[in-house]
Amino acid sequence: MKKWIMVILATLFITLAFAPAAFAESAPPADFKIGSFTQVDAAAHTATFVSSETGEAMTVAIDESIKAEDIKLDDKAMVSFSNTDGAEAATEITPMFLGLTRDKLIALLIVGLIGGLLSGFIGSGGAFVLTPAMMSLGAPGAVAVASNMCHKFPKAMVGAYKRFRYGQVDVKLGLVLAASSIVGVQVGFQIQKWILDSWGSAGSDLYVSFVFVIILLVVGLFVFKDAMTMSKGDVKAKTPKLALRLQKIKLPPMIHFKKADVVISAWVTFPVGFFTGLLAATIAVGGFVGVPGMVYVIGATAMVASATELLIAFVMGMWGSVQWAMAGLVDVRLVLIILSTSLVGVQLGALGTTYVKDYTIKLVMGTVMVIVAVSRGVKIPVYLDHLGIMTLDKSLASALDAVSFWALIAALLTAGGIISAAMVKGIVRSRIEEREAAAAGSA
């Protein structure tokens, strides 16, 4: 088990620290700005661009790969520029806000509901479903990350309070990890901003998908394997061997977490919180590292870890939202639409934890992670094509888009199905036990 944990931590460090630098070596830096186009001269292939940050208007050339008629005037966009012979030229234009059709609105409401259900049930915020879902519907990666983080902290607050009332949240553990997660958020925000400045929106999409695939597969397969082992017979949850070894490290300050029933050095908790915040800021997902980290590194039960993660998500989500909002990348429409149904889902998910066994939470988490990893993985060649790193046939690109979309739908249906079935089974079992107890008492 120790080797698996070391693989996870090493993967996180290498991916988040060195992958951006590796990408940068194969492409020239791009000057990235957010703003809108007010005029387009199709004949001269130039346009007037107004920066949202400074309000300055400038005339720029339009790259030959961009059709003048495709540029929507007065719509906010993320634009990458190159400077050739002293002249600015727009090389990539990505609309900031996706067009909200009726179908997309319904899809976002459903995604929000299931994301909330996952959030309340497994404590990861459901963000590993929501970020890919928004990207699949047309939102740029950076906007999906920013909007997801902005929506999750009020939802996490509701879920944390709900599960606190059930006696599942370790407040001290949550606050300690939240402190180090804020450090990770700051570092992650700078990484995502650097990628946008260097590679533009396509680079951000590629980076988000790449990290999703690596982390989801490593963590998801490990958690799923653990859940399947626990589900066989009456196997009880045991404190992982790595956590037991780390608990023996007596490096001050030592902290006693009452609800988690753990005494451990604060230095052991720091990397768990740091990497949780780092991932939350770069891809809006930290829970699938935070929850396993609390289980396998610190030694908390899956029930306490999934509940405590909601408290951490609230603190770092609020902090990260301020950072992303100041960068102008939050789509308030997406935030409010998803939040409207996820607040309902998070309460249903939290209720469901009172009727299921510990391994069911791990089973749901592992299963959905693997499916979402497939959804993001098939999109990587498409983003490489957008960046000019490889050439992809249009029919193949469309096929990969379809596979990505339907894999995501499968993840949503799987999550909703497993959680709903577990809740119904648990409720029925609970009522049968109540009737049997009442009958025994009256006899």
Image (cartoon, rainbow, N blue to C red):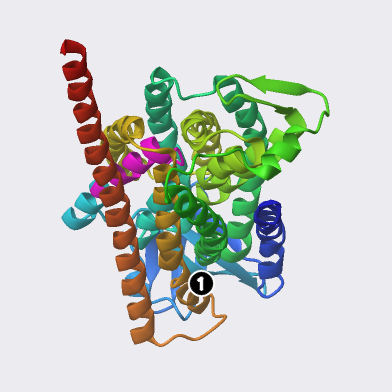
Q: Residue at x 54, y 80 (%)?
A: 388
From the viewer's perspective, tell me whether residue 281 is left or right of residue 94. right
The relative height of residue 285 versus residue 158 in the rendered view (above or below) is: below
Task: Determine which residue is flagged by label 1.
Answer: 61
From the viewer's perspective, tell me whether residue 2 is left or right of residue 222. right
Q: Is residue 120 magenta?
A: yes
Find residue 342 and report its image quarter.
top left
Q: Residue at x 60, y 52 (%)?
A: 193
Q: Which quadrant holds the C terminus?
A: top left
In this orientation, does residue 308 appear? yes
Q: Nearer the viewer, residue 201 or 47?
A: 201
Q: Is residue 152 magenta?
A: no
Q: Nearer the viewer, residue 326 or 140?
A: 140
> Measured from the top left, where is residue 124 in percent x and y?
46, 42
In this orientation, does residue 137 appear? no
From the viewer's perspective, tell me whether residue 114 is left or right of residue 294. left
Magenta span of residues: 110-126
Q: Nearer the viewer, residue 374 or 435?
A: 435
Residue type of the residue flagged with mark 1: Ala
